[in-house]
Amino acid sequence: MFQKILIANRGEIAVRIIRACREMGIKTVAVYSEADRDALHTLLADEAICIGPAPSAESYLNMEQILTACVAMKADAIHPGFGFLSENARFAELCEKCHIRFIGPPAEVIHRMGNKSEARKTMMEAGVPVIPGSKEPVFTVEEGLKTAREVGFPVMIKASSGGGGKGMRVSYGEDDFASNFQNAQMESVKGFSDDTMYIERFVERPRHIEFQILADSFGNVVHLGERDCSIQRRHQKLLEEAPSAAISEELRERMGQAAVKAARSVHYENAGTIEFLLDKNKEFYFMEMNTRIQVEHPVTEAVTDLDLIKEQIRIAAGEPLSVTQEDIQITGHAIECRINAENPDKHFMPCPGTITDIHLPGGRGVRVDTAVYNNYTIPPNYDSMILKLIVHDKDRPSAIAKMRSALGELVIEGITTNVDFQYELIGDRDFEDGNVDTDFIPSHFPDC
């Protein structure tokens, strides 16, 4: 087992990893930018080292600085968390060359599954259902239009290296295809330095269903059931729950088997997520694979009673999975609300600032993952998510009631947050009835 792990991240996920390491008897090293000198992860870790100025490109995305810090602090391994360098194949490769264990899949797998068109091709060869679309990368409007005509409009134009909704456009016909393609491609070049695109049929009003998988170096692969991540705004998730109200036991079995097949096909290791779109006819299609721990992993932990961060660490240390597929039981229902420092009334504009007072909810089945505290100043340089509120109860109605109570108790003063918006969302009748899809936010909250 590792003696010391460096966490190449910040915020609540860094705190989450530090706590897991502490329980396992592993020392931790926090890296921090100049803006995060007083951040909670910096204060909680056994050791901390500054890696640069506030901008991410000069700190949390600076591979050389992070690797140098790891060597200087004599850490055995690096946990990348999510975001930043977590899905950067080059960083994973450099860790391997420096004899530092990267707590995640091998670099080759990250590269293969990080390229969306390559991932599609791989899944097709493995027999995993994919949305009809281009089989090869697309670089020009003419190539894209030819594919669009073949699969039929509407189509989704996607950047092969994209993520978080960037480099994506929906085209409903030939008249708007060229402009949408060019805009998506320019966004991809700007955001990912990659002009590779692909085209797929646009599945209207689907559910976004993802399956958590774990895989070790001995060939063992299991899935931990699904998460419903359909509540999104501009492809950014706002609320997640497990299990999905739309999934039967028979469908869960089929989708779970497909997720395991997908992981096996690329010889996956560590924690990962297979993301599917589920249409109104209960047909599912592979969308992408996330080769890291996810923001919403706590809802899976709640319904399976597994610690996914500890599993990640054990797998990276060469240990086999602690569970078999038969061991995994889904119990109750869990919901996670992402609490962000942003103003929903101003198109979710980020609102950094100083927290003057904070009260966190508690009680049975209530969990708060955060790195903020009273008088903490939220810097303007990073993602606006400041807190994750997770509840678990015997069934979905009980979990909804518990979340409503927890949101009502949550107080964050000094900054503007989306707490009230989440409270309104959780109380919506269609949400309560489980009538959700990826268009839920624009259809129910059109002003957002």
Image (spheres, helix red, strand yellow):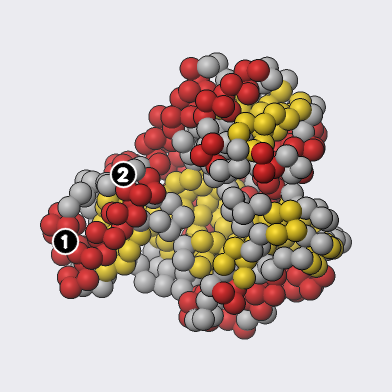
Residue at (41, 72) in percent of width and height: 205
Q: Position of residue 143 (x, y in %)?
A: 15, 54
Which of 240 and 6 lies nearest the eye of the viewer? 6
Residue at (27, 51) in percent of width and height: 197
Q: Is residue 44 visible?
A: yes
Q: Secondary structure at mark 1?
A: helix
Q: CA distance from mark 1 to mark 2?
A: 19 Å
Residue count near mark 1 (Cα–Cα under 10 Å), binned few <14, some 14–19, many ≥20:
some
Indicate the quadrant where residue 340 lies: bottom right
Residue on which the image places disc 1: 145
Q: Position of residue 393 (x, y in %)?
A: 76, 64
Residue at (82, 62) in percent of width and height: 356
The answer to whether residue 381 is above or below residue 396 is above
Q: In the picture provided, is 126 more to the left or to the right than 7?
A: left
Q: Position of residue 421 (x, y in %)?
A: 65, 74
Q: Which mark is residue 310?
A: none
The amino acid type of the residue labelled 1 equals Leu
Q: In the picture provided, is 373 more to the left or to the right than 180?
A: right
Which of 320 and 148 lies nearest the eye of the viewer? 148
Residue on which the image places disc 2: 194
Indicate the quadrant where residue 123 lies: top left
Q: Is residue 388 visible?
A: no
Residue count near mark 2 (Cα–Cα under 10 Å), binned few <14, some 14–19, many ≥20:
some
Q: Secondary structure at mark 2?
A: loop
Q: In the picture provided, is 36 more to the left or to the right than 160?
A: right
Which of 183 and 79 lies nearest the eye of the viewer? 183
The quadrant of the image that shows the N terminus is top right
| Chain-order first, disc 1 or disc 2 | 1
